[in-house]
Image: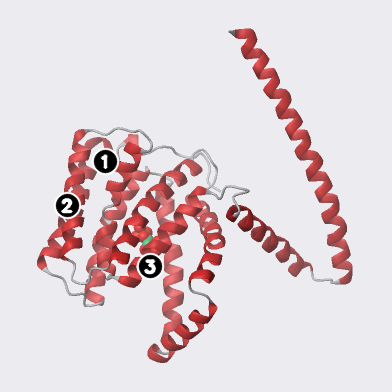
Amino acid sequence: SQPIAIGLTEESEAAQRVKIGGYFAIWWSLNVVFNIYNKKVLNAFPYPWLTSTLSLAVGSAIMLVSWGARIAEAPKVAVAHTIGHVAATVSMSKVAVSFTHIIKSGEPAFSVLVSRFLLGESFPASVYLSLLPIIGGCALSAVTELNFNMIGFMGAMISNLAFVFRNIFSKKGMKGMAVSGMNYYACLSILSLLILTPFAIAVEGPQMWAAGWQTALSQIGPNFIWWVVAQSVFYHLYNQVSYMSLDQISPLTFSIGNTMKRISVIVSSIIIFHTPVQPINALGAAIAILGTFLYSQVESFHPFNSANMIHRKPTMV
Ligand code: 3PG
């Protein structure tokens, strides 16, 4: 009844005030200590650029340890982006680029399954039916792949799942915020770097990297450095643009667009790397991609359907 509701509101408002009061007290105390030590350091060591950098680096390290020790929850979106990226890259290190992307063309199916079973959304029967060619086509391609490798296959599957979560969390994160897709992706990229670095050092490490770098340089020559620069720069640029589009469309439409994109990746990589393809293998890829096309034609999920344009922001920063 009303009195109880008012009582509860008053209580929670009082608790909220105490909490904010506590935050202010801690904020001010910590800030006093910071200012004193900051100045002591600057008096003895007048390098403000380095000390500013150190404060941020230590802050990042503190958060990394807090996330690792589960004292604080790591931003889910960055964890999902990190897992999806590493899993896809591990996959591509084991199998042909075309194979990774054929399996990744199943992403819309993951999108529907996650939305259905984890978020409780329901879809018309036609959506579920259109998943059959997607899943069947991917399966046909996988079983007829000449150089099938389980790590390569699982990497692409894990990447599918992780990126569906990444897209859903990103969409929620961007909703109503005056942050553009470009800047949202920039923050995601920096956070993922933080999360990934200790794992990369633990799994591979500087010794392995130095030896591998020497081998690659001796086999390929100085051009190898440009390849590394290109893969890194283009990775950022294409993702940045993809986020500029995710900002305007639903995660589901994003997955469909992403699968359509794979046709060009699959065809160009087969030509450039002279990947041997069996007709039945290519048929599987074609069926999967056709399935995604059919899926995109289901009226309520059409990329330009207004229901898919979850929100528009008034301002972009
Ligand atoms: C990655 O490394 O993140 C993947 O290659 C990207 O997958 P995408 O094609 O879904 O962006």
Tell me which residue sits at (84%, 72%) in the image.
45
Element at badge 1? loop
| Horizontal side, residue 153 vs residue 49: left or right | left
| Residue 5 at x, y percent in the picture | 62, 13
| Colouring method of the image | secondary structure
Q: Amino acid at mark 1?
A: His
Q: Quadrant of the N terminus?
A: top right
Residue 298 percent across, percent down from the top left: 21, 39
Image x and y of residue 282, in percent = 15, 64
| Residue, disc 3 | 90
Which of discs 2 and 1 lies nearer the camera? The answer is: 2
Tell me, for residue 136, which label it has, or none. 2
Q: Which residue is mark 1?
A: 302
Q: Quadrant of residue 59?
A: bottom right
Mark 1: give few (<14), some (14-19) or many (20+) Cα within 10 Å: some
The alpha-carbon separation of the residues under discs 2 and 3 comes to 24 Å
| In-front residue for pair 304/298 | 298
For the question of whether residue 238 can be seen, the reply is no
* Badge 2: residue crowd in 10 Å (few <14, some 14–19, many ≥20): some
Q: Residue at x 19, y 43 (%)?
A: 130
Q: Secondary structure at mark 3?
A: helix
Q: Earlier in the sequence, mark 2 or mark 1?
A: 2
Task: Tell me the amino acid under the disc marked 2.
Answer: Gly
